[in-house]
Amino acid sequence: MTKNKNKKKYKIKNWPDYNESLKQRGTIEVWINDDILDKWKALPSGRPGAQPVYSDLAIQIVLQVGKVFHQKLRQTEGLLENVFRLMKVKLSVPDYSTVSRRSANLNVLLTKEAKKKGEKLIVVIDSTGLKVYGEGEWKVRQHGVSKRRTWRKAHLMVANGEIRAAELTKNNIADCDVFENLLNQEKGKIDTVAGDGGYDRGKVYQACLKRKIKNILIPPQENAKIKLHGNLNSEPHPRDENLRQIRKTTRKRWKEESGYHIRSLAETMMFRFKAILGDKLNARKLENQVTEFLTSVSIMNKITSLGMPDSYVVI
């Protein structure tokens, strides 16, 4: 196989800081600190009947620690009991059945960095698959896919190396059906949206126009036609404008000049997501899988906040 001579090489210029952030990912203090311990117990709900012992934050922390250190619920319970004992913290740890039951209705908080004043928010949307159960990739290549192979679809909206919105669905849900839900999770003004050809649907453009998004970087289909011609007294449709630029030059040239290749940020995030946390969901019920997925998303944003590489092209 020949090497690509035109492939760009990158070098990290903040390696000491980035190296320290990589070490911090495995530090237990990052995931369990004094603020969390103060909010470990649940406050009285004010409703009659038995009161919850553990707060929602405590349940989320147990799930986070399990995902970070690749532990199942039972092993995570044992790990935290040991950590609390070494820390001499007199707090009980929720058992695995309590965590499983409570996680079905848990409202996971997705921490995001505040948008800077005047910053143009460029978001990239894409989806990937997360395995629930079934054979591994090697067995599939050798013997084919069985009926018991089940996946979930993870939809992500990424900006500046951070996940700004996320949703988990069954694998028969189209990307375009989730598009508007992802946009609605971002309350600030969005300047540019990028996505692959799977988002070339009328409902996607309607959602973008509704949010008054200026730049829509979605490649039209190969057989696409102009919908609103120039002789009509109406504002040009963004899809038609993209199609006109493609016809003037080439599809490849349009992608380069429009900045469409920023879409690779979503693919990079999905690679990091699976490399760090795995490509499999441990929960069996869809409700618990959603919570597990959103917990993983919150972990990725926490990791991003610890520090990211600042690289430049080597000439």
Image (cartoon, helix red, strand yellow):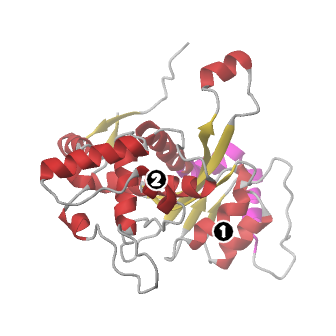
Q: Position of residue 173 (x, y in %)?
A: 73, 54
Q: Residues within 10 Å of mark 2 (few under 14, many from 20)?
A: few
Splitting the image into 4 quarters, where does residue 119 fall? bottom left
- Reply above or below: 300 against 60: above
Q: Which residues are magenta?
A: 236-262
Q: Position of residue 219 (x, y in %)?
A: 71, 52
* Residue 256 is one of the magenta-drawn residues: yes
In the image, 269 versus 77, the foreground residue is: 77
The answer to whether residue 126 is left or right of residue 120 is: right
In the image, 236 versus 285, the foreground residue is: 285
- Reply above or below: 286 against 10: below
- Reply above or below: 89 against 313: below
Identify residue type, mark 2: Ser
* Residue 143 is one of the magenta-drawn residues: no
Asked if disc 1 and disc 2 are in contact, CB closer than 8 Å, the reply is no
The answer to whether residue 66 is left or right of residue 157 is: left
Splitting the image into 4 quarters, where does residue 237 fall? bottom right
Q: Main secondary structure of the magenta part?
A: helix
The residue that appears at 46% across and 69% down in the rendered structure is: 120
Q: Which mark is residue 180?
A: 1
Q: Which mark is residue 97?
A: 2
The residue that appears at 24% across and 54% down in the rendered structure is: 30
Quarter in which the N terminus is drawn: top right
Instruction: Give me the C-alpha separation between circle 1 and circle 2.
Output: 35 Å
Identify residue type, mark 1: Glu
Q: Position of residue 99 (x, y in %)?
A: 44, 56
* Sequence-first tag of 1 and 2: 2
Which residue sits furthest top? 1
